[in-house]
Amino acid sequence: MTDPYRGFAGPETPRPQSAHDGRDGTGFVRPVLWLLLVVFAVGNMVTSSIGGLSVFVGIGFGVATLACAVALVAHHRRHGRRS
């Protein structure tokens, strides 16, 4: 019995290699973003728990944490997960 979802496709061909296979220098972006995310999140927690610091310092750490998280999601959607 044939697979009804396969259609009339010919034999499977191997997937072409991605242009982003790690040799173009993007392999360091994800670890750096994770490191910055952790540093900014810890900075946000510390500034939130210490009184006397400016509120804007805590807000700055929070915005930087959010920016790193958004950049990680965008990088993941653009490049996918590599093993």
Image (spheres, rainbow, N blue to C red):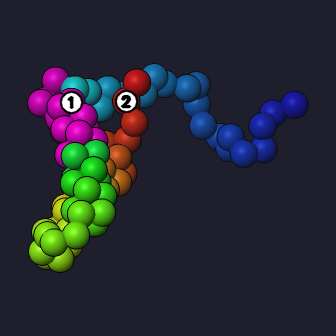
Most foreground residue, 45 or 82? 45
Q: Of all residues shown, which one is farthest toward the front?
A: 52
| Residue located 30% across and 63% down the image | 49
Residue 63 shows in the view:
no
**On screen, 73 above or below 83?**
below
Image position, residue 42 (x, y; %): 27, 50
The magenta segment: 23-36
**On screen, 57 above or below 24?**
below
Total count of labels: 2
Most foreground residue, 37 or 46? 46
Does 63 sit left or right of 78 as displayed?
left
Residue 53 shows in the view:
yes
* Marks 2 and 1 close (CB-CB < 8 Å): yes
Does 14 sit left or right of 57 as displayed?
right
Disc sitting over residue 82 in the figure = 2
Secondary element at image label 2: loop
Most foreground residue, 38 or 23? 38
Kind of residue sitting beneath label 1 = Gly
For label 1, the residue is 27
Disc sitting over residue 6 in the figure = none
Image position, residue 80 (x, y; %): 37, 41
Q: In the rendered image, which quarter is residue 20 located in?
A: top left
The earlier-in-sequence mark between 2 and 1 is 1
Quadrant containing the N terminus in the rendered view: top right
Kind of residue sitting beneath label 2 = Arg
Task: Say few, some or many: other residues with alpha carbon within 10 Å of mark 2 (under 14 / 14 to 19 / 20 or more).
Answer: few
Quadrant containing the C terminus in the rendered view: top left
